Amino acid sequence: MSDVRPLEPGSRYELRTGLSPDAPDEDKFKDEEGAFGYCHSYETSSRYDGPGLRAVLFVSGCLLRCTYCHNPDTWHLKDGSYMPVTQVLKRLGSFAPALVSVGGGLTISGGEPMVQLAFTRRIFRGAKDMGLHTAIETSGFLGDRADDDYLANLDLILLDMKSGDPDTYRRATGRDLAPTMRFAERLAAMSKPVWIRFTLVPGLTDDPANVEKIAKFVAPMKNVEWVEVQPFHKMGEFKWKAIGLEYKHANTEPPTREVVNRVLGQLRDAGCQAR
Ligand code: SF4
């Protein structure tokens, strides 16, 4: 059994590893109760991860292995801090009145929040009880796990599409694109508000044909409020080195303004609200 640890404030760019060495592997993890879970850190004042001012909780565990990931220290449950959900909700409760007063809310990111489905379900439920707007940032790869009760506690899905082309998706993440497409279609059918996020990585996801596939897939979806283009950056490179992983993008530069504008143009031409 891992030691229980406090929920520590911090930033997504702080390296945290080896805090719960006895934790199960994330791909075998069955999270049925959700009374305890594994967290990386939290931020209290993001203006980026949903509408208004956001508290952002970064939970541990992810089944994807994106080659450009800036949080590889959230991939494994064993790298996170083990803690009771009551502690998370108590901490959230101390920010909730301020967040509610400015129309903000809670975003759970990671890692992949649906690895710890029962734990994050309890947190979202608690956040709704506090009157908070709730958002999840997810790849959608585990979207089949999210039952309607889980989605009922979510006001917004930040869906990381990563790629429109299955081969590119597999090269970028090591996994299949189909579950994410299926999840996006389900969210569209239930009119659940979605912001699509697309990381623009030169030499990997920037091919016009790849962008076109995303644009054509997303454009008819009336529930998609925004498609956000996120230019590749290297702020997480030091983590790959510290963990002893090979970072394939050491020589990749952020996309130029021209490429970002070309991608935004492709999305807008297809009918997407893109920024
Ligand atoms: S889904 Fe997110 S946390 Fe998981 S590997 Fe990809 S970028 Fe990293």
Image (cartoon, rainbow, N blue to C red):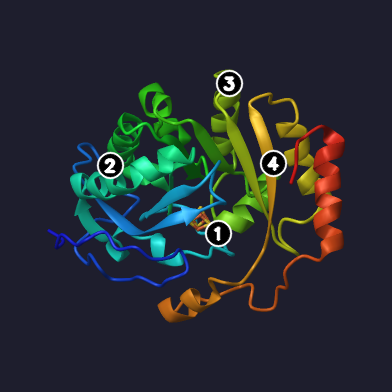
The answer for how far apart the CA atoms under marks 3 and 2 are is: 25 Å
The answer for how far apart the CA atoms under marks 4 and 2 are is: 28 Å
Residue drawn at (68%, 46%), measured in percent from left and top?
228
Mark 4 in CB contact with mark 1 (< 8 angstroms):
no
Mark 3 or mark 2, which has the lower sequence index? 2
- Whether the residue carrying mark 1 lies under 8 Å from ligand 1 is answered with yes
Q: Identify the amino acid type marked 2.
A: Phe
Mark 1 or mark 3, which has the lower sequence index? 1
Q: Which residue is mark 1?
A: 66
Above or below: residue 156 compared with residue 78: above
Residue drawn at (61%, 57%), measured in percent from left and top?
172
> Residue 232's quadrant in the figure?
bottom right
The answer for how far apart the CA atoms under marks 4 and 1 are is: 20 Å
For residue 227, the mark is 4
For residue 119, the mark is 2
Q: Identify the amino acid type marked 3.
A: Ser
Residue drawn at (71%, 33%), measured in percent from left and top?
218
Depth-wise, is mark 1 or mark 3 nearer the camera?
3
Above or below: residue 9 compared with residue 236: above
Residue 174: x and y in percent read: 54, 55
Q: Identify the amino acid type marked 4.
A: Val
- Whether the residue carrying mark 4 lies under 8 Å from ligand 1 is answered with no
Q: Residues within 10 Å of mark 1 (few under 14, many from 20)?
A: some
